[in-house]
Amino acid sequence: MQIILNGEVRAVAQGLSVSALLTELGIDTRKVAVERNLEIVPKSAFETTALAEGDRLEIVHFIGGG
Amino acid sequence: MDGDQKTSADFFEVAGKRFTSRLLVGTGKYKDFIETREAIEASGAEIVTVAVRRVNISDPKQPMLMDFVDPKKYTYLPNTAGCYTAQDAVRTLRLAREAGGWNLVKLEVLGDQKTLYPDIVETIKAAESLIKDGFDVMVYTSDDPIIAKTLEKIGCCAIMPLAAPIGSGLGIQNPVNIRLIIEEAKVPVLVDAGVGTASDAAIAMELGCDGVLMNTAIAAAKDPIRMARAMKLAVEAGRLAYLAGRMPKKLYADPSSPLAGLI
């Protein structure tokens, strides 16, 4: 299935969890926040949140800024 | 109480937390993370501002700010730089809270790209929504004393008027307004943006500000580490001068040596 990940179309496995996606991407879950269809996915729900076709996902972190 | 004791007990409090360094620094525009870390160390800052951006999916192994600037050692203050609507700012800070796990944030909603001047209508809207949602909001604003009071009334925990446009380095353009804001405020007032060099920071502190927040003045100096140290000293000097109480200005000379006993 396809999702929009940080503004780009990406093919992922059907029913993939947020946590599995982060592992697949090699992202340290402690350092990021995830938003799914404009709603925050709490870190505690990464395991149990399954992605669906067309989901819009944002994965963000802190960078240098003023 | 003598002067030294007064200084050692000197702190400002924001959202129930005490800070002894009155210099807050940004973490942007540095050559690399090593320089960022060294400049922050030299500045003595306890609070550092950070931005919230998308993770680079194609290269997630890139070094991250958190690997160089320890969030356990420094208080990360997530900002909303680049947000032009209340909605975007609130969305950004909700993500920041989830990424970091704390409520203290810096709200800035910008009006246009040329001046980066704050959009006050959107700022107020965002502040109300964030405060309702449990955030402690330090707010970037114009140097308008009435607006500053409004932001305090709706519950912002610190008011941060600009000295001059962000990144301009022009120094305090309207010291009269900054002083009026300080006189009326019951929450900390910090000058945020527009400081160019050490004397600008000292002036802000001499006016009675609780602190100064800057980024470009340090990061864009030829030697950022040295400038960070200069800013640390300037903020301390300005604070001491404010506490000491300056002499009154006079129109004419007044000799420093006694006239009695002149030969």
Image (tube, grey):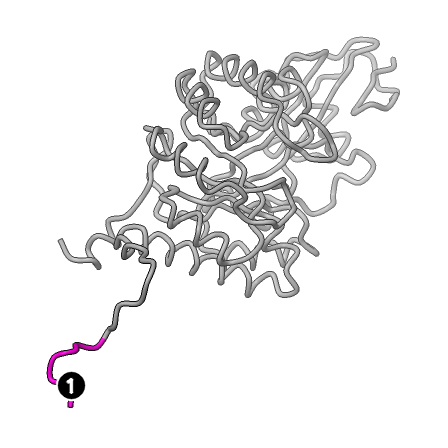
Q: Residue at point 65% right, 27% down?
A: B110
- List the single residue furthest toward the left: B261
B201 sits to left or right of B186: right
Q: Which residues are magenta?
A: B257-263
Front in this rendered view, residue B176 or B37: B176
Choose between B174 and B258: the one closer to the eye. B258
Q: Residue furthest bottom?
A: B263
Residue underneath mark 1:
B262
Which residue is at a point 50% across and 34% down the rendered structure image?
A: B161
Q: Is residue B262 magenta?
A: yes
Depicted B241 relative to depicted B176: above or below: below
Residue B249 horizontal/vertical position (percent): 32, 56
Residue B123 location, quadrant: top right
Outermost residue, top side: A53
- Residue B102 visible within the image: no
Q: Identify whether A42 is placed above or below B218.
A: above
x and y percentages locating residue B252 in the rendered image = 32, 63
- Quadrant for residue B193, please give it: top right
Q: Secondary structure at mark 1?
A: loop
The question of residue B162 being in magenta is answered with no
Whether residue B187 appears in this view of the structure is yes
Give the residue drawn at x 66%, y 44%: B64
Indicate the chain on which mark 1 is placed: B
Amino acid found under the numbered disc labelled 1: Leu
**Position of B261 compared to B143: left or right?**
left
Q: Is residue A49 left or right of residue B258?
A: right
Image coordinates of residue A46 in percent, x first then y, are 63, 19
Residue B53 image point, x, y percent: 69, 32
Q: Residue at x 31, y 44 (%)?
A: B11
Please say if A60 is above or below B155: below
* Magenta segment, prevailing SS (helix, strand or loop): loop
